[in-house]
Amino acid sequence: MGRRSGVLEFAVLGLLHDAPMHGYELRKRLNVLLGSFRAFSYGTLYPCLKSLVAQGFLVEDNPDVEYVPATALNGKRSKIVYRLSPEGKERFEELLAESGPDAWEDEHFGVHFAFFGQTDRAVRMRVLEGRRSRLEERLERMRNSLARARERFDDYTVELQRHGLESVEREVRWLNELIETERANRTGRTGPSTDGTGPAVPKTSDGRGHDDGSSDPPGPPYDRPGRSEQER
């Protein structure tokens, strides 16, 4: 399975783990979860849904609407509701537990982070530390490249590379804060509790706390990896 399709599978299973929904609502939630820069078309989403149904991970329910095939004339599509099967729930749990190199990469990290509230703390730590290690390697390469660029390219090209470098540096600082928060709260909880005894809410580098229950990291490329309480 390709990286992009793997990200979509994980996101779909995670959203349907919360509640069943039809394709249109699922697409809207995906765009919120993964960000508009990675918006999915129906042409991408529905083959993924059909594949998950064929694998036994999803079940199609359409109790209220008789199936009407979409045509150029009527433009109608039945509202099939998708829900997780027991096998789909097991598959989602397997994906939550993954903490290898794929979970650290750009394509996967955002969606893994979006479901950190349901992820074991040890897995969260491995993913965060792996992501930080990967970005520190990237930083070293970018600094070397910027040093060479100052001698070979014009000022605008150098500024573009410097901008990219600063973006990665910001994410590394943010990861450092998250890792320190996780280490300071070795309670084994998977998220803030309702009685106020759970882990402290991490703050972003600008001092703002995520007091709405989400874990949105600041700035691109992960502006909206999770959902607010109003969107749930």
Image (tube, rainbow, N blue to C red):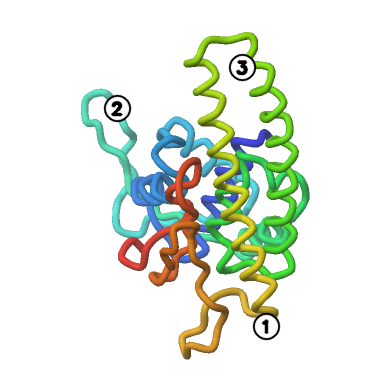
Residues under labels 2 and 1: Cα distance? 55 Å
Q: Secondary structure at mark 1?
A: loop
Amino acid type for the residue under numbered disc 1: Thr
Amino acid type for the residue under numbered disc 2: Thr
Q: Earlier in the sequence, mark 2 or mark 1?
A: 2
| Residue at the spot of label 3 | 150
Determine the residue positioned at 56% across, 24% down. 161
| The N terminus: image quadrant | top right
Q: Earlier in the sequence, mark 2 or mark 3?
A: 2
| Residue at the spot of label 2 | 71
Residue 220 to residue 188: above or below: above
Disc 2 or disc 1, which is closer to the eye? Answer: 1
Given residues 202 and 118, the one toward you in this image is 202
| The C terminus: image quadrant | bottom left
Image coordinates of residue 203 in percent, x first then y, are: 49, 65
Label of residue 187 in the image: 1
**Disc 2: CA contacts within 10 A as few (<14), some (14-19) or many (>=20):** few
**Disc 1: CA contacts within 10 A as few (<14), some (14-19) or many (>=20):** few
Q: Is residue 162 visible?
A: yes
